[in-house]
Image (cartoon, rainbow, N blue to C red):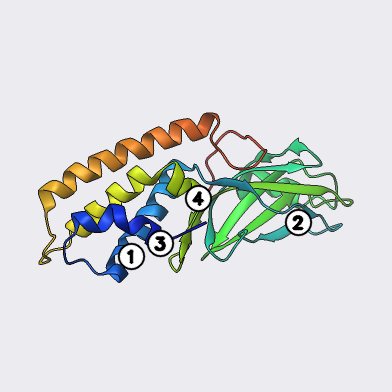
Amino acid sequence: MKPLSAFYSRILPYLPGCSEPLAAQVLIDSAIEFCEDSLTLRQNLATFSTVVGQAQYALEPPTAQHDISRVMGVTLDGAELAAGLIEVIRGDLQTAVAKPRGFYIDRTDSTFMLTLAPPPDQVYSVVVNVALRPTRSATMLDDDLYNIWIDPIVANAIARAMEIPGQPFSNPALASVFSVDAARGTISARIEGNYSSVRGSMRVRSRPFA
């Protein structure tokens, strides 16, 4: 993990008069947007065991610096489960107990709930692969965001600051240039992430969730 200040030398020279608190704000906003759009920051959450008859399980981010952005896949004893909408798996949820065949993700505020369907009939090992993003209160960012994807994150941070009106560094025209560079980098990151550049050992196809 890298402190936010590690990024400032690439941001502040373009923003004369910009305070460090503002630089931190646009940097975090940029990093969150990058992670949500690129899905490059992926990781397997800690393995947990099911409880007989219990269908729902709360998912916790790996650190206080992270939020879960999206659930990418779930395995049960090493076998990938099928993702579905609650309407699709409702019948399985009404089954007394059996080996789960699918799952549903429900999000309330910032809490993700994993629902296994049918409810498990015995103890199984569950691994959940997620895409992560920094929290709004993050003080550090992942090494990969600094070592690999710093250019689009910094470009978007600079663009966000330049779009603020009435500042010494306000420059909507140049902000547009930085925004385009950031978008290109984010698209490249997503393409690369879909093939190989993901954290964790589990590789899964991206799927839509409700």
- Which residue appears at 84% of the width and 53% of the height? 96
- Which residue appears at 37% of the width and 35% of the height? 187
Give whichever of 14, 119 is nearer the camera.
14
| Labels 3 & 1 near each other (Cβ < 8 A) | no
Nearest to the eye among marks 2 and 3: give it: 3
Q: Earlier in the sequence, mark 2 or mark 1?
A: 1
The answer to whether any part of residue 110 appears in the image is yes
Query: What distance separates the C-alpha of mark 4 from that of mark 2?
Result: 35 Å
Q: Which residue is denoted by mark 4 in the rendering?
A: 143
* Amino acid tagged 2: Ala
The answer to whether any part of residue 157 appears in the image is no
Q: Residue furthest right?
A: 122
**On screen, residue 192 above or below 85:** above
Q: Earlier in the sequence, mark 4 or mark 2?
A: 2
- Within 10 Å of disc 3 (Cα), the crowding (few <14, some 14-19, many 20+) is some
Q: Which residue is denoted by mark 1 in the rendering?
A: 25
Query: What distance separates the C-alpha of mark 4 from that of mark 3?
Result: 11 Å
